[in-house]
Image: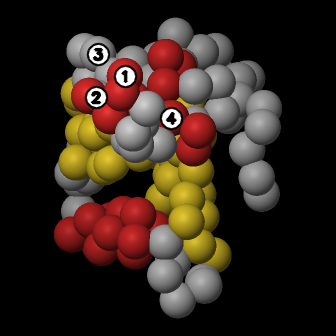
């Protein structure tokens, strides 16, 4: 699934997202219900910032994540239609590591 994100939605910034990283989408749906979609593997990240980021426009970028089931696909859609944050786990993180600081609960 392709997800359009604002780098400000990523604690640690966009550079913390790499191919192979695992991300959790945390937020509220457009209807206001809290929702978390954990454990999505990043398949593709932008090679460079989008044109809006350089010209002072919207800094949004698109990442691609693996979504293994239709149920999770619906949850990803529900989260990304509302307000959300992306929490990143580095692919080289140890088992004791968790999301980067700065995320909301």
Q: Which residue in the structure is indicated by mark 2?
A: 50
- Quadrant of res 98: top right
- Quadrant of res 22: top left
**Extreme front residue here?**
55
Residue 48, label in figure: 3
**Residue 74 location (% of width, % of height):** 30, 73
Q: Nearer the viewer, residue 11 or 55?
A: 55
Q: Which residue in the structure is indicated by mark 1?
A: 54
Q: Earlier in the sequence, mark 4 or mark 2?
A: 4
Position of 76 with respect to 10 (left or right) is left
Q: Earlier in the sequence, mark 3 or mark 1?
A: 3
**Residue 82 location (% of width, % of height):** 49, 72
For marks 3 and 1, give the CA distance.
Answer: 10 Å
- Residue drawn at point x = 60 percent, y = 83 percent: 33
For marks 3 and 2, give the CA distance.
Answer: 6 Å
Q: Are marks 3 and 1 in contact (CB under 8 Å)?
A: no
- Quadrant of res 103: top right
Give neighbour class at mark 1: few <14, some 14-19, many 20+ (Cα, 10 Å): few
Q: Earlier in the sequence, mark 1 or mark 4?
A: 4
């Amino acid at each position: 699934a392709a997800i359009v994100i604002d780098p400000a939605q990523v604690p640690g910034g966009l550079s913390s997202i790499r191919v192979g990283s695992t991300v959790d989408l945390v937020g509220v749906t457009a209807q206001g219900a809290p929702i978390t979609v954990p454990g999505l593997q990043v398949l593709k990240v932008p090679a460079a910032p989008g044109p809006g980021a350089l010209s002072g426009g919207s800094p949004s970028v698109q990442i691609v994540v693996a979504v293994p089931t239709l149920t999770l696909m619906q949850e990803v859609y529900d989260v990304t239609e509302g307000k959300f944050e992306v929490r990143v786990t580095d692919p080289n993180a140890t088992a004791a590591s968790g999301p980067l600081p700065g995320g909301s609960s």
